[in-house]
Image (cartoon, rainbow, N blue to C red):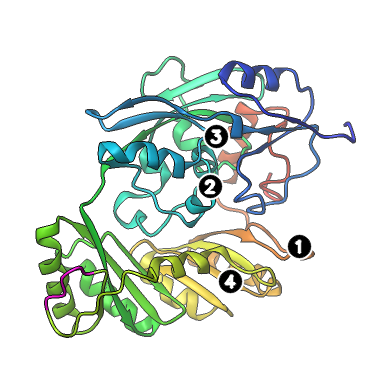
Amino acid sequence: MSTTTTTLRPSDLRSLRDAVLDTAGTIGIAGAGTAAGWAGRLGPVDAVLDTTGLTGVITHNPGDMTVSVRAGTPLRALQDELAPHGQHVSFDAARVADGATVGGLVATADAGPGALVFGSMRDLVIGVTLVLADGTVARSGGHVIKNVAGYDLAKLMHGSYGTLGVLAEVVLRLHPVPERAATLAIHCSLDEAAEHAATVLGSPYEPAAMEWTSDGVLLIRLEGTEEALDARLQRLRTALGTGELLDLPSPSDEGAVRQADPDPWERHASLVRGTSSHASLRIGVRPSRLPGVLADLPTSAVTAGLGTGVATVTLPPEAVAEAHARVHAVGGTSVLRSRPAAADVPAWGPTPSAITVLRAVKAELDPQGRLGPGRFDPWM
């Protein structure tokens, strides 16, 4: 293996394929760098494929509410282009504001509070075009030209961390931009938040997002029309018996408070990003088990999706291995999102039961192990 790493920046599908074919050794895939420290550390590679040259909308069909976009396009830029049509990608991960690309968000299986209704990128992607390690250009979903061994490549690429192929193009499902969005903020403990969440989810209040943070605040976001949203918020507040109404242009009772700035969801996003001295872990368990798991962890910061079962926690590096084990013990999943520069902490938990399948897929799509070495250490 060469001691020098070459950086290649293709600008279209053809040059991406040529870059893969012209590189004989191992390859790392890089986008905007907003998740460079997630999962396992990338091992030594002969070349890095910088996908940020793969930008721009290919086809936008407003009537079908779909868009085909090159994978290196920042989602933030895509949202700006869709906005005049009253459409958007219903996805609100914190990294979007930092310039995260469409391909990077798919590859890292990221998601935000809006996943409560719209799911992750896995649920919004309806087609992909990618280049495999041998230079094969494969398409899956949308206008299918070639499937590879019957695999649903759009699903496989979600959370693959650049180990199965290089995303070139992504087709996304769109949704209308809501006329208004407002938030009910409730100051409460995690246990109290779980009780409130059960009430909300068991009734027809249709929250767009619901997250508890370790600041001791449960945030419930509602979206809808101008004329209907105030009444929905008041019904929700009455049902819960508490809460501060935020971002209301016309408060309809004396207890409501208008507060457009600061945005409580910006604070939520800052907690997701973690710190330089602590590790950050993303965990997913059955929603009913999430409060119990979080109570057992020595966390310094938490954002918890009480309806999705997904949380991001910040904790000391020495506690990461035990946290992985705790999540695994209840049938959940966990992955490292950030680590202090000098910390040697495990990126993944105990080996999952599906490891045989994962290794078989890797062997089928990248038999020489060229793509993303180290990202899934020690699993494969």
How far across and how far down the image is residue 269, in percent? Answer: 47, 64
The tally of labels here is 4
Q: Quadrant of residue 287?
A: bottom left
Instruction: Please name the predominant secondary structure of the magenta segment in the image.
Output: loop
Q: CA distance from mark 2 to mark 4?
A: 22 Å
Label ID, residue 72: 3
Q: Which residue is identified by label 2? A: 99
Q: Earlier in the sequence, mark 4 or mark 1?
A: 4
Amino acid type at mark 2: Gly
Circle 1 crowding by C-alpha within 10 Å: few under 14, some 14–19, many from 20: few
- Note whether 68 is above or below 187 in the view shown: above
In terms of secondary structure, where does tag 1 sit?
A: loop
Residues tagged 4 and 3 counted as in contact (Cβ below 8 A):
no
- The vertical placement of 375 against 185, above or below, is above
Read off the magenta span.
248-252
Lower position in the chain sequence, tag 4 or tag 3: 3
Residue 349 is at least partly visible in this image: no
